[in-house]
Structure formats: structure tokens, C-alpha cells
Image (cartoon, rainbow, N blue to C red):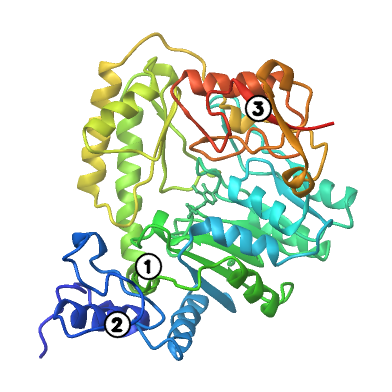
């Protein structure tokens, strides 16, 4: 019997061809058996920049030859397509950002409309810029008790489809950033009855669909295309993502063209191998790992609810593995709680005044989740204040007035003006508090005093104002004329 390879402790390589190729290549590299005369320039040596390049292996010309590696890639991707019930799949080393943009480029033609929810990630909005698509916005309902967005109602999407019969697709972000979910099977029916595909940005949902107590993933729910970040919910390298599709309503060749148009020609094999490994793990152990995660999160939610004033997002409209903690009833400021957690080595996905969002994954056992939960509670107790009503964040409440299509505005002549003079003008830039990365202003949208005020509040609270030419918000870039 051969001894288990410590570099593959669960023995995933038998069902993971890209992982197996990476294990073989990196063993040779570590043994100093290679003198490569191609890229990458570190040549598998660590004597110049050190171990920062350890484990890096080019996919083309490393895991397989430049001429033949596509066979290996297709093998790994076909296994993922089969697992998720798709008939087309590509692995990306550029995150769901790239996946969203590839899917935007895979539908319709410049000038066509898409029905799309406004609390979308900025990557999808820039996908609209790239593809020249015209958004028809649908809004999420805001839950008054939590100040957080729910899923998108099917009625809103049906009405938008009826009002815009020329739309070429429906795009939804689901689950939302806060883990709320829409009725995807009904959305799929609505889109299909209108003769258009349903595309889902499921960046946070790579783990869904592999346990009876978690919602089905978007493809199983009837979507035609979906993007998932393997690096968010699965144990894959940062940047690893999958784009999956069923090709009844989407063209396979167009999907490939769209994907390749915006992907690097030099993907690192390490990221691709980690996606392959995560897929093999999910296929084999998905039920057990989901079970452990569900137990850990359920216990954490119960424990947090015992603390006076503290609440968690829960219930049928919420995916059960996310930990969205509602602080308003304790009076604690989430920005300070987040700082305590960072100091304790337990950085969370998001913290704003009223909310802490933690992302336990299949890598976390119950003990780790419980330890995090107690640290969070200790911080909340130390930071207690007067209970308050939650105020929905700017990202969730934005009601844009689109004056010009995002693509036209992106390329239009613009100028920089002081903030007060910007109100009533049309934005040339995309500005998103990050997290959650949902644009409060996008190219082509009217700059309102509400939007400027909301952004200023985020900045005053210590939030990051991302993608703005002037993150201090003293000036804005507006269209000329
Ligand atoms: C809803 C949503 N879609 C897409 C993305 C982009 O994902 P990635 O970081 O994998 O590029 C994010 C990132 O946080 C996101 O929240």
C-alpha cells in the first residue's frame, strides 16, 4: 500500500486531474528536477524573492505542455459541469468579477436591455459597460427590522419583463451579499416564459445544493448561467471561480468567446488545481461537510440570540450557512466590534454600524465557529450602548435614475467638479462602498443629494469609498455638457 501524500491529505487526486498534475509538477519543482526555459520568471526557484512564489505553477507549460494542456482543462471543467448539472463550465483565475463580465458578454448585443437587480456587485455593472447592455432595474425589498435587503420578488421581474419585451436576459444576484434568497425556480420560469435566459451571480453560493437542508444552487433551480466564487465558500485559492451554464438558451461558442475575451492567457495552475480539488471534495464529502457547517452555524445563531439585544438573520428567506449578526438592539457599533475581531485574528467579511457579516465555510469545524462566536459576544458586551433602530446602508437603498446607458457614460467626456456642484449632474464614475461593493453611483446615473449624503455617511463611519476618483468625496467626476 502506498503511503498517503501529505500534500493531498484526503486523497482527492484520484478524481481531480488538474490537482494531480499540480501535485506531480510541484513535486518535481520542489526536488529541483526542472530547469524550465519558459515562464514564469521565477523558474520554480525561491532564492530571489523567496517563498512568496512557492506552489506557483503555470497551467500552460507546467501542469501540461502549452500545446496539450487544454485536454486537462476540459477534463476538470467537464467534471465540474457534471457535478453542478451544467453542460458548459469554465474555471477562472479572475474571480466572479471575470465570470460576471463573461456572462454579460455572452448575452444579447450592444444596446439591448437586461432586467437586473440594482444591488448588484460592481463587476456586473462593469459587465454591462463592456457588453453595452442597458439595465432595467428591479429593486429588492428592504426588511424594516434588520435594514437589510431581501431577495427580489418574482412579481417585480415579471412586471419588468412585460414592460420590456425586448429585454434579452434576466440577471439576479442570489444569494444577496447578506445571504437572503429569491425564489429562483419561479424566476427561471418567468424568464423562460418570456423566452430569455436567467443568469445568476451566485458568487457567495459555491457550497449550495449539496445537502437537503440548504437551498439548491441556481443551475438546479433552473438558471441558464451562474457564476460562483470557489474562493469564497469553498476551500480554493483566492481568485478561483467557476462559470457554469446550460446551453439551451445560451450559445456555447459565444460563452467560450466571452470567457476567453476577458481571461488571462497565463492562468496559474495552482488556482485551477485548487478549484478542481474543491470540486472533487464537494462531490465526495459535500453532504458531511455541509452537515458540519450547518450544525456550527445553527449553534452560533442560537447562542447569539441568547445575548440581550443581539439578533441574527434567519428564516426561510435566508441561506442557512451565513452568519449575519444584527447589533442595533445592543447599541454596540459594528465598526468597533469589527476592529476587535480583527485584533483577535478573526477578520470578518463585513462590519458596519449595525451589522457584522461572517462567512463560516466547510473548512470551519464547530469549535472554530463557537470560538469566533464567543469572541464576538465578548466584544459586543464591551461595546454595549443604547439600543437604536438600524439604518439601511446606502448600498441597499439606492434608487438610481439612469440618464445615460452605462457604456455611453463610461466613454463620454467628463470633468471634475466640487461635490455641491455635482448634484443634479450625471455621474461619469462608479462609486461603491466596499464591502459590499454595490455601486451607490454608476456611470450614467443622476447624482442626487441623497447619494452624496449616503456616501459621506459611509466615509464618516470609516468605510472604504472604492473606485471613486476622489475617495474623500470633495469632488466628483461628471459628464460635461
Ligand atoms: C455578489 C458578488 N458578485 C461578485 C463578486 C466578485 O467576486 P470575486 O471577488 O470572486 O471577483 C463579489 C465580491 O465580493 C460579490 O459580492
Split into 4 quadrants, where in the image is the N terminus? Answer: bottom left
Residue 289 is left or right of residue 68, and the answer is left
Disc 1 packing (10 Å; few <14; some 14–19; many ≥20): many
Distance from disc 1 to disc 2, alpha carbons, whole Å, reads 13 Å
- The kind of secondary structure element at disc 3 is strand
Instruction: From the top left corner, tell me how far across and down residue 49 is, in percent.
Output: 22, 60
Distance from disc 1 to disc 3, alpha carbons, whole Å, reads 38 Å
As displayed, is residue 94 above or below residue 23? above
Q: Earlier in the sequence, mark 1 or mark 2?
A: 2
Q: Nearer the viewer, mark 3 or mark 2?
A: 3
Q: Nearer the viewer, residue 158 or 266?
A: 266
Total marks shown come to 3
Q: Nearer the viewer, mark 1 or mark 3?
A: 3
Q: Which mark is residue 271?
A: 1
Q: Residue at x 29, y 85 (%)?
A: 14
As displayed, is residue 145 above or below residue 284? above
Split into 4 quadrants, where in the image is the C terminus? Answer: top right
Instruction: From the top left corner, tell me how far across and down residue 341 is, in percent.
Output: 27, 32
- The kind of secondary structure element at disc 2 is helix
Q: Earlier in the sequence, mark 3 or mark 2?
A: 2
- The kind of secondary structure element at disc 1 is helix
Residue that badge 3 annotates = 476
Residue 159 is left or right of residue 42, and the answer is right
Q: Residue 39 occupies which quadrant of the picture?
A: bottom left
Disc 3 packing (10 Å; few <14; some 14–19; many ≥20): many
Q: Residue at x 13, y 81 (%)?
A: 31
Residues under numbered marks 3 and 2 in contact, where contact means CB atoms less than 8 Å apart: no
As displayed, is residue 148 above or below residue 54? above
Instruction: From the top left corner, tell me how far across and down residue 312 is, in percent.
Output: 42, 32
Q: Which mark is residue 20?
A: 2
Amino acid at each position: 500500500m502506498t503511503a498517503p501524500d501529505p500534500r493531498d491529505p484526503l486523497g482527492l487526486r484520484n478524481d481531480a486531474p488538474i490537482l494531480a498534475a499540480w501535485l506531480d509538477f510541484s513535486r518535481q519543482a520542489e526536488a529541483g528536477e526542472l530547469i524550465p526555459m519558459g515562464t514564469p520568471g521565477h523558474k520554480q526557484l525561491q532564492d530571489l524573492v523567496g517563498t512568496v512564489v512557492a506552489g506557483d505553477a503555470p497551467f500552460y507549460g507546467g501542469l501540461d505542455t502549452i500545446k496539450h494542456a487544454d485536454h486537462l482543462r476540459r477534463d476538470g471543467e467537464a467534471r465540474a459541469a457534471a457535478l453542478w448539472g451544467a453542460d458548459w463550465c469554465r474555471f477562472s483565475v479572475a474571480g466572479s468579477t471575470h465570470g460576471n463580465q463573461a456572462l454579460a458578454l455572452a448575452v444579447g448585443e450592444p444596446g439591448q436591455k437586461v432586467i437586473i437587480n440594482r444591488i448588484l456587485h460592481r463587476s456586473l455593472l462593469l459587465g454591462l459597460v463592456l457588453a453595452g447592455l442597458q439595465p432595467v432595474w428591479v429593486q429588492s425589498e428592504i426588511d424594516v427590522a434588520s435594514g437589510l435587503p431581501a431577495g427580489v420578488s418574482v412579481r417585480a421581474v415579471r412586471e419588468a419583463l412585460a414592460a420590456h419585451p425586448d429585454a434579452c436576459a434576466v440577471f439576479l444576484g442570489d444569494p444577496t451579499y447578506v445571504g437572503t434568497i429569491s425564489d429562483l425556480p419561479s424566476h427561471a420560469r418567468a424568464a423562460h416564459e418570456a423566452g430569455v435566459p436567467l443568469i445568476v451571480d451566485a458568487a457567495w453560493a459555491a457550497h449550495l445544493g449539496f445537502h437537503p437542508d440548504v437551498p439548491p444552487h441556481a443551475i438546479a433551480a433552473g438558471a441558464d448561467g451562474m457564476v460562483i466564487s470557489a474562493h469564497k465558500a469553498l476551500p480554493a485559492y483566492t481568485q478561483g471561480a467557476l462559470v457554469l451554464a446550460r446551453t439551451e438558451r445560451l450559445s456555447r461558442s459565444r460563452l467560450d468567446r466571452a470567457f476567453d475575451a476577458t481571461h488571462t492567457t497565463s492562468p496559474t495552475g495552482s488556482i485551477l488545481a485548487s478549484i478542481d480539488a474543491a470540486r472533487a471534495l464537494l462531490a465526495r464529502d459535500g453532504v458531511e461537510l455541509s452537515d458540519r457547517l450547518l450544525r456550527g452555524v445553527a449553534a452560533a445563531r442560537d447562542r447569539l440570540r441568547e445575548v440581550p439585544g443581539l439578533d441574527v438573520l434567519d428564516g426561510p428567506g435566508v441561506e442557512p450557512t451565513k452568519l449575519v449578526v444584527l447589533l442595533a438592539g445592543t447599541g454596540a457599533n459594528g465598526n468597533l466590534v469589527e476592529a476587535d475581531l480583527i485584533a483577535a485574528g478573526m477578520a470578518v467579511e463585513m462590519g458596519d454600524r449595525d451589522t457584522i457579516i461572517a462567512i463560516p465555510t466547510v473548512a470551519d469545524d464547530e469549535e472554530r465557529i463557537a470560538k469566533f462566536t464567543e469572541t464576538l459576544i465578548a466584544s459586543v458586551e464591551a461595546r454595549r450602548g443604547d439600543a437604536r433602530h438600524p439604518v439601511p446602508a446606502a448600498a441597499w437603498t439606492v434608487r438610481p435614475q439612469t440618464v445615460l446607458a452605462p457604456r455611453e457614460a463610461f466613454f463620454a467626456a467628463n470633468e471634475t467638479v466640487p461635490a455641491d456642484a455635482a448634484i443634479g449632474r450625471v455621474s461619469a464614475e462608479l462609486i461603491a462602498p466596499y464591502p459590499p461593493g454595490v455601486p451607490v453611483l454608476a456611470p450614467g446615473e443622476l447624482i442626487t443629494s441623497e447619494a452624496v449624503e449616503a456616501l459621506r455617511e459611509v466615509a464618516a463611519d470609516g468605510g472604504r469609498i472604492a473606485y471613486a476618483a476622489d475617495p474623500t468625496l470633495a469632488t466628483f467626476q461628471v459628464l460635461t455638457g
